[in-house]
Image (spheres, grey):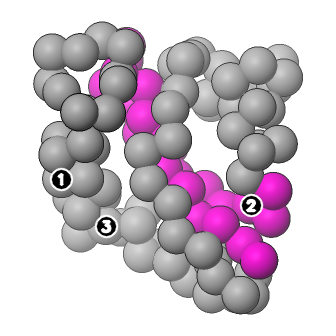
Amino acid sequence: MFTVYVLYSASFDQIYIGYTADINNRFLSHNELATKGHTIKYRPWVIAYIEEFQTKTEAIIREKQLKSAQGRQFVRQIIKAKFKATDTHAQPH
C-alpha cells in the first residue's frame, strides 16, 4: 500500500506533497528526524490530506496530479475547508 499525502505548515502557510509506503515514519521524518531538506524549514507540519493506492505507480501518478496547478488549487481548497485561516496551530475544525 502506498500513500500520497499533503502536509500543511500553518506557521508558514506552506504545503508539501509526497508519497510513501510508510506514512507514520515519513511524517515523523518530516517533523523531527530529518536534518536537511525542504520541509525542515517549515516545521511543524500536520497531515492535511491522504489518499491510498495499491501500487507505487498509481501513487506517483496521483502525486504528480496534485503537484500540478489544478492539483494545488484542489489541495488549497481542502486546506481552507479543513483548517481555520486564523489558527496558527492548524487544528482541524
Residue drawn at point x = 82 percent, y = 42 percent: 25
Magenta span: 1-22
Q: CA distance from mark 2 to mark 1?
A: 23 Å
In magenta segment, residue 93: no
Residue type highlighted by circle 2: Thr
Tell me residue 52's x, y (percent): 60, 74
Q: Is residue 13 magenta?
A: yes
What residue is shown at x 30% (from left), y 55% (from top)?
75
- Position of 47 with respect to 14 (left or right) is right
Q: Secondary structure at mark 3?
A: helix
Q: Earlier in the sequence, mark 2 or mark 1?
A: 2
Q: What percent of the width, then of the height, locates residue 63?
A: 53, 69
Vertical arrangement, residue 11 with respect to residue 28, above or below: above
Name the one closer to the observer, 31 or 36.
31
In x, y percent, where is residue 92?
31, 33
| Disc 3 to disc 2, C-alpha distance | 18 Å
| Residue 63 visible to the viewer | no
Dominant secondary structure of the residues highlighted in magenta in the image: strand
Residue 33 image position (x, y, % from top left): 84, 23
| 52 on left or right of 75 | right
Q: Provide the residue designation for mark 2.
A: 20
**Which residue lies under the disc numbered 3?**
71
